Image (cartoon, helix red, strand yellow):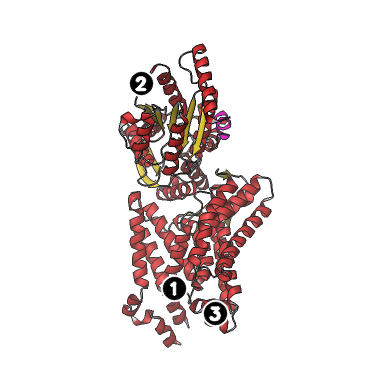
Amino acid sequence: MSIITKLAIAAGLATALSTAAFAQDLTGKVIGFSQIGSESGWRAAETSVTKQEAEARGVDLKFADAQQKQENQIKALRGFIAQGVDAILIAPVVATGWEDVLKEAQEAEIPVVLLDRGVDAPEDLYLTSVASDQVLEGRVAGEWLVNQVAGKDCNVVELQGTVGSSPAINRKQGFEEGIASAANIKITQSQTGDFTRSKGKEVMEAFLKSSNGGADICAVYAHNDDMAVGAIQAIKDAGLKPGTDILVVSIDAVPDIFTAIAAGEANATVELTPNMAGPAFDALAAYLADGTEPEKFIITESKLYTSADDPAGEYERRKGLGY
Amino acid sequence: MIRRSLLKLANPQLLALVGVLLINWLLFPNFFRVTWQDGRFFGSLIDVLNRGAPVAILAVGMVGVIATKGVDLSVGAVMAVAGAVAATMVVAGYPAPIAVVAALVVGLLCGLWNGILVAVLDIQPIIATLVLMVAGRGIAQLITEGFIVTFNDPLLIYIGTGSFLGFPMAAVIALVLTIIVTLVVRRTAIGLFIEAVGVNRAAASLAGIRSRMLLLLVYSLSGLCAAIAGIIVAGDIRGADANNAGLWLELDAILAVVIGGTSLLGGRFSVPLAVVGALIIQAMNTGILVSGFPPEFNLIVKAGLIFIVLVIQSPLASRLAPPRLKPAAKVAAK
């Protein structure tokens, strides 16, 4: 069966079904998804969640893995345009160099939705972008700590991400905003743990030594869960109880942090949701049905998880997603 | 006699190590405070030994390679492979000792592969080992399927975080390995053969040294050392992180060897001084962490200190140094 007959059948199905189902439905629509690759667990989880969301909506998802190369993504986009898909999702690997191919998509009247990352291109070249607010993530973590210590003095040590990376800069800024109102909370030490477990552990060991064996530390804030997992081990090695003697709050909500939360060794994590596709599909459904223009920047929820949010269940729910 | 051994101690590497430790002490007065806690020593100085151990172990393997005028860029990737093998095997239910032995064998084979490329195919070492540096991390990712494979096996965790007589297991392993390798190369003729091959391989072969065999040996040792370091690093975080385990550590190992006074042009080498070099690097890293500098300064501070250490060791500096520190003075003291 040629692609054209496939498409014709798909289009026929779509018209048949859209009259029957309610207006905002993507059933039978063909949507191309150009993913960066699978450089991190989160990225792999984003891919599997996107596929799940597409299946739940009856979308025929054309998936293209670019293996971290922009030229592969541009090729994939041109391929989608040639196939005449109904819409395109793309997680751009870099910010620049997208104008030409986005114009081609626009001329073919195919709406493009950016996932997770932005591009340096005129805003009218894409329908919308779905991304998390990294500053908000830090702020949610900071506000949780303010509520948790409830006015008591609290010295925080911070494990930063890779120096100069945008999540590190934004999550640091957000946390500082979150605790700005509380004069009782101070960041006493801040160092980079490069987003890795081993560096997080090594840096936490040094912090514990230079803070009176950890007695002067009330909480640790890590820019990602992996560093928090490393820090938890360092705290245990120092003879203290993570989660009790030293509060642990971090960002990302990967499965392993839920194991730690369930064991009482971590206190809270802020989710960087891998479900960027859900909001994207919703926006596309409305747009394709009656041309409703979505907001230009859709911000995903930065949900806080603590021991009250069934950490063991969250672990089970996430472990198969490819983190 | 006593005077001679004191002079022997006063080499630039040990002076540099003492200097870095003193700077750390000035920045952080409790730096030398070591306490006894939960059956082990606890303190910044112990952290230097513990965290410096993986690079020290890599340096023990690397020094032999560099002494033959080679270099092994693949050790960081081999660490990731060995950690991945050990972790996936214990997770799959194999007993830990078998997983450890398997990881060591894989490391040895990786080293042997490098050795064959260099000694048999005569490929330049920097290119030959670059192959495995790039491919190794990919292999590790294939083994772990892209996940961080976490485990709770007591033996692996003991290797990474346990203690022996109060000292971190990693440091004890590094010490034992250093002593064994030093004895083997200095109490037998192997050290001399390595130096001969490094100075002039053709001449060494003509003199009857089986240089091909010797190269296979030093690269295999380097791979084995990398595997040991990889198991330690995986045990430390109770997981094999294929993307980050050993990342850039090959450069730290080369730097440690060079700080230890071994020339990249081959020939003269010292195993214990390469280990001291690794400790200098780690003393700097730990010092930066406890000093409270903003992280933006980490690399600049490290580069500046390394520059000073290398200047102190430069031929010009040794000409300007007081005569009793010169190597020639040792000869005179005899």
Residue A316: image location, x then y, percent: 58, 31
Q: Which residue in the structure is indicated by mark 3?
A: B192
Q: Return the chain for callout 1.
A: B
As rendered, which of A45 and A163 lies closer to the eye? A45
Q: Which residues are magenta?
A: A313-320
Q: Residues within 10 Å of mark 3 (few under 14, many from 20)?
A: some
User: For the residues tagged 3 and 2, is the chain the same?
Assistant: no
Q: Are marks 1 and 2 in contact (CB under 8 Å)?
A: no
Q: Residues within 10 Å of mark 1 (few under 14, many from 20)?
A: some
* In the image, residue B107 lies in the stretch drawn in magenta: no
Residue B125: image location, x then y, percent: 50, 67
Assign a secondary structure to mark 1.
loop
Amino acid carrying label 3: it is Leu
Assign a secondary structure to mark 3.
helix
Amino acid carrying label 2: it is Glu
Residue B263, numbered label: 1
Residue B127 to residue B160: above or below: below
Residue B190 to residue B331: above or below: above
The quadrant in which the N terminus of chain A is found is top right
| Residue at x 39%, y 52% (from the top left corner) | B289
Q: Which residue in the structure is indicated by mark 2?
A: A293
Q: Tell me the CA gap for discs 1 and 3.
A: 15 Å
Residue A128: image location, x then y, percent: 37, 27
User: For the residues tagged 1 and 2, is the chain the same?
Assistant: no
As rendered, which of A224 and A232 lies closer to the eye? A224
Q: Earlier in the sequence, mark 1 or mark 3?
A: 3
* In the image, residue A316 lies in the stretch drawn in magenta: yes
Label 1 or label 2, whichever lies nearer to me, is 2
Q: Return the chain for callout 3.
A: B
Residue B248: image location, x then y, percent: 46, 56
Q: Return the chain for callout 2.
A: A
Amino acid carrying label 1: it is Ser
